[in-house]
Image: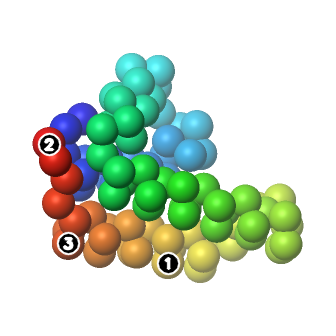
Amino acid sequence: MTRCKEFCDRLSDYLDGEIGKNECILIEEHLDVCPPCAGVFEALKTTLQLCREGVSEEVPQEVQARLKTFLRQHCHNQECGE
């Protein structure tokens, strides 16, 4: 996984534990070398954690959709070093 767009397309699935071990490794390697994507990852992870603690166990579908839209927009405007 060498491109930010590929990373962002799979980030939600990664956080939800819905991808395989090999793809997890690729995402984690990308996070190690791409500070902008690492920042997006941390922001998304924190947002999801706050939603779970403040709302309920499940993040509302509307919030999930907004986060995915934000990630897609961010990734289209983002350049990484790879």
Amino acid type shown at disc 2: Glu
User: Residue 43 versus residue 8: which sits nearer the camera?
Assistant: 43
53 relative position to 66: left or right = right
Query: Label 2's element?
Result: loop
Residue 8, x across and y down, in percent? 34, 54
Q: Quadrant of residue 70?
A: bottom left
Q: Amino acid at mark 3?
A: Asn
Q: Are marks 1 and 3 in contact (CB under 8 Å)?
A: no
Q: Is residue 28 above or below residue 53?
A: above
Q: Residue at x 78, y 63 (%)?
A: 52
Which sits in the foreground, 67 or 39? 39
Dot label at residue 82: 2
Q: Secondary structure at mark 3?
A: helix
Name the residue located 42 percent from the left edge and 33 percent from the top edge. Answer: 28
Residue 66's tag is: 1
Residue carrying label 3: 77
